[in-house]
Amino acid sequence: MEKKVLTQEELQNLKDFQTREENLIVAFGQIAYQQQTLDEQQDKVIEEKEKFEKERAEFALSLTSKYGNGTINIETGEITPTE
């Protein structure tokens, strides 16, 4: 049986495809790693947002208890009561 051998060009093409595939695998791994880091950062920001909203709601309730319902001028601190 006659031995069949690829041409140098064909062999180089196969090697190039293998190298490109390996590079893609590495790139996908890097993206997955970065995504994990971003997910962790997002979780921390979500926790901070929830803490912020709770603190803001508690502060608003304390102001309402002290001054009643109204609109506050953020520049002057003046409260305009609402009915």
Image (cartoon, grey):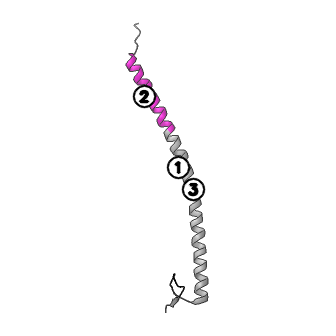
Taken as a whole, is the magenta stretch helix, strand or loop?
helix
Residue 46 image offset from top left, x and y in percent: 56, 63
SS of the residue at dot 3? helix
Image side of residue 22 versus residue 13, left or right? right
Question: Residue at the spot x=58%, y=86% of the render?
Answer: 64
Residue 35 bears which disc, if any?
A: 1
For mark 1, give the secondary structure. Answer: helix
Disc 3 to disc 2: CB gap under 8 Å? no
Identified at 61% across, 88% down, the residue is 66
**Magenta highlight range:** 6-26
Q: CA distance from mark 1 to mark 2?
A: 27 Å
Q: Between disc 3 and disc 2, whose residue precedes?
A: 2
- Check if residue 57 falls in the magenta segment: no
Relative to residue 32, is residue 83 depicted above or below? Answer: below
**Residue 17 badge:** 2
Residue carrying label 3: 41
- Residue type at numbered disc 1: Gln
Identify the amino acid type marked 3. Gln
Q: CA distance from mark 3 to mark 2?
A: 36 Å
Residue 80, image x, y percentages: 50, 90
Mark 2, Cα crowd under 10 Å, few <14 / some 14-19 / many 20+, is: few
Give SS at disc 2. Answer: helix
Disc on res. 46: none
